[in-house]
Image (cartoon, coloured by chain):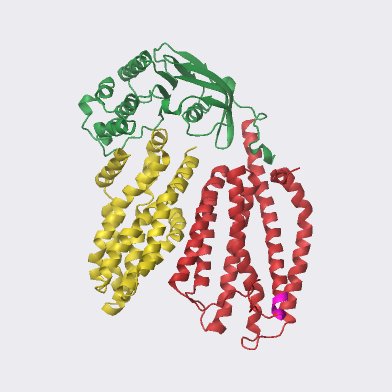
Amino acid sequence: MELQVVDLGVARGGLPILQGVSFTLEAGQVLVLRGPNGIGKTTLLRAIAGLQPALSGHVSLDPEAVAYAAHADGLKSTLSVLENLTFWAQVYGTTDVAPALQAFALQNLADRPAQNLSAGQKRRLGLARLLVTGRPLWVLDEPTVSLDASAVTLFADAVRAHCARGGAALIATHIDLGLQSDLLDLTPFKATAMAQGDFDEAFL
Amino acid sequence: MSFWEYANPKRFMALSSAALPWFTALTALVLSVGLIWGFFFTPDDFRQGSTVKIIYIHVPSAFIAINAWLMMLVTSLVWLVRRHHVSALAARAAAPIGLAMTCIGLITGAVWGQPMWGTWWEWDPRLTSFLILGLFYLGYIALWEAIDDADTAADLTSVLCIVGSVFAVLSRYAILFWNQGLHQGASLSLDKEENVHDVFAYPLWTCIIGFVLLFITLVLLRTRTEIRARRVKALIARERMA
Amino acid sequence: MIALLIRDLRLAIRTGGGFGLGLAFFLIIAVLVPFGVGPDSAVLGRIAPGILWVGALLSCLLSLDRIFALDFEDGSLDLLATAPIPLEGLVGVKAFSHWLTTGLPLTLAAPVLGLLLSLPEPAYLWLILSLLIGTPALSFIGAFGASLTVGLKRGGLLLSLLVLPLYVPTLIFGAETIRRGAEGLGTATPLTMLGAITLGTLAVLPFASAAAIRINLR
């Protein structure tokens, strides 16, 4: 399992926002993406997860290796915690949801409908989904939003355990997770107006 | 130099600005010759009287209404396969013209049908098919208008155009099955024994050529407008980035 | 994929508004029409096939925008698109579960409403048969329309405008089957055509819808 990003450029709403992003991520590593709001962290992660095409450069990884978690948790409010998690486990062809529940301290909430959870509990459930995917590369967009300090510790532990099992994580976040991680600041990769390739440039 | 070079917006703008005056003049010439010929220098029909002369608008507009969709289908495919922006914008430009032609065809048909069949509207296969074609145009235009991002809109309308074409053909045969109508057969066809008489046919062909020229002129004009609109957007975007 | 189907059905039942609403709407149409055209059972019997088909079509339309919009809003669609289910399969499953919650109940309820509209006796078999064969096409065409409008804020009205013209062939062959059945004519042709349209939409439209969803997600 290795993620290799070479000279990647991405666009949002028809505008190029990042260019020339290159990095590699190996098994056992954590890479944290930094950068001011609007720099394009979310867009970059979506491109790596295969949800939108890159403007230039390329991403080399096995698409079957990625588990993606966005701002929205994708929870169904009328299903219980257990049902939500079991559904994703079945989609990814795994069966055991108990470790995921335990890792994010959700055992006591297992039968509660997702609509009755607090924001932080929902987030924990969304993150527990990562564990049932059984996939090695986690691509996470602001995973700690609305988590309290103890939940952040739970999350950091989960990432650490994941890396120990040979996984890797690419995380866009602003807070310090206390993890052994590399840091990539996206600010220098902001796209300049000149280097837009064939885009709407054709109309100028 | 390949044909696709013209798909570059700049090149297209240069070429179309040179061609447009010629097309405009030619359209005006052919259309006025055809219409004046048809309206004033052909005899009245022995059964239909002067009402027959509406054929010089009715048939060409119906012809354009169908072929405009065909042109949109081709340009949509070109956009999906080759990603030429001009192609997508030409499809967008053609849709309202096609809709207008459909309306003209329906209205002139109603005006013609009233004295002939004694009714403004009849659920006849041809009429009904045209009504459905109008609905397809409406949906297509509405989808273009609803989506903000230009490339997303181009992609989705192209998919709609392709699927719509299949269903349009399907509807045509479904409607034929549903009701055999009182509309006469095709007025002009190349392989049929019995066409309209030559006295009517020559001005009619002139009018059809005139309408085709009109369509080309309008599409060129509207595509230029669309390209300019995109250029404005691109400029605003660049301002914002700088 | 079976997990997805089960989830969708469970959601439709728990959230309400799924098939309950569509059925109620169907019922209301069948009840309102006699008020509009008068209680003459000869007239009603003649227009019943058309009313029932148009009613089924409109009730189907009612729940179309929920096929993808809900999953799009809560982020599930992004996650499902990165999950190991092909998007084409996802569309197929969602359209199928839409049919199970609208098309199938409509088909089962239609004979009762046919009674209200004094549908002639020989027509009942054809009513059920044509709805059973035709309504899957409504769901799959609708899913295509829904995938085109999934990213839009108020896509509901646009969705109807896009989908209704596409329903024309299905409606014509469906209603024609019942009408011919009621008059004792041969129904083989329209029924075969109806089946052909349904099979065609089942085979092709999931690919078009998946393409549209990919475009909408990027």
Quarter of the rendering occupied by the C terminus of chain A: top right
Find chain B in the image and tell me its colour: red
**Residue projecting furthest to the top:** A180
**Which chain does green denote in the image?**
A
Q: Quadrant of residue C111?
A: bottom left
Q: Quadrant of residue C109?
A: bottom left
Looking at the image, which is closer to me, B240 or C36? C36
Q: Relative to B240, is B179 above or below? A: below
Q: Residue at point 28% right, 60% down?
A: C107
- Is residue B200 shown in magenta? yes
Looking at the image, which is closer to me, B72 or C37? B72
Q: Which residues are magenta?
A: B198-202
Whole-percent x, y for residue A175 in the image? 42, 18
Whole-percent x, y for residue A52 in the image? 50, 34
Q: Is residue C158 left or right of residue A109?
A: right
Whole-percent x, y for residue A171 in the image? 44, 21
Whole-percent x, y for residue A199 in the image? 63, 36
